[in-house]
Amino acid sequence: MRLNGDFFKIESRMEGLPEGQSGFNVILNPDHLIYKAHFPGQPVTPGVCILQMIQEILSEQEGMPLFIRNIKNVKFTNLISPLIDSRISVLFSSVSEEEGGIRAQGVIARRENTADVFLKFSVFLVREAF
């Protein structure tokens, strides 16, 4: 299930980041059906949706469909509520090609202050679904 365009929207690519880094500004849709179930009245972005968002954004960046093969590390440091933080940033500190796929590390952070991190991640993606 593709989430880009409905659950979230890529608003812009971030400019002026250090060499080797990339980032995207994203808008979450607080009216999406997922938030009505997770959790009614106090919506929280599900972890699986956050991982799907990372996959879709990296696919967009690399210009090809990618699929998460391995999650090396995911550390949730704050909840993402679309009512409080509907505008977030997805920052890739490192994206490198490795045999058979792409390794990416980064964070999802509050747009106004990217030092305020919601999630740190390290994932390995492949070009074909397995």
Image (cartoon, rainbow, N blue to C red):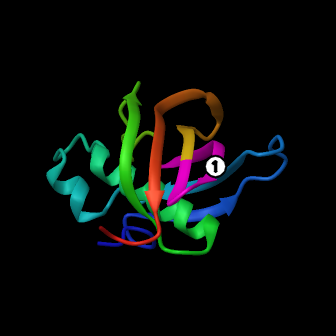
Identify residue type, mark 1: Val
Which of the pair 82/123 is nearer the observer?
123
Between residue 16 and residue 6, name the one nearer to us.
16
Crowdedness near tag 1: few (<14), some (14–19) or many (≥20) residues, C-alpha within 10 Å: some
Residue 8, placed above or below residue 48? below
Residue 93 part of the magenta segment: yes
In the rendered view, does 26 fall on the left or right side of 29?
A: right
Q: Quadrant of residue 119?
A: top left
Q: Secondary structure at mark 1?
A: strand
Q: Nearer the viewer, residue 45 or 68?
A: 68
Residue name at image x 40 percent, y 36 percent: 72
Furthest-front residue in this view: 99
Query: Which range of residues does the magenta coloring cover?
Result: 86-103
| Residue 57 placement (x, y as % from top left) | 53, 61
Q: Residue at x 80, y 44 (%)?
A: 17
Q: Is residue 78 above or below residue 3?
A: above
State left or right for residue 110 relative to residue 40: right
Q: Look at mark 1 in the image and give the residue it sits on.
A: 95
Residue 58 lies within the magenta run: no
* Count of numbered tags: 1
Q: Main secondary structure of the magenta part?
A: strand
The quadrant holding residue 129 is: bottom left
Q: Quadrant of the image for the N terminus?
A: bottom left
Q: Residue 71: x, y in percent?
A: 37, 42
Task: Provide residue 6's location: percent of width, then percent of height.
Answer: 39, 71
Quadrant that contains the C terminus? bottom left
Residue at the image point whose x is 47% and y is 37% from the top: 121
Q: Residue at x 44, y 69 (%)?
A: 4
- Residue 55, image x, y percentages: 45, 59
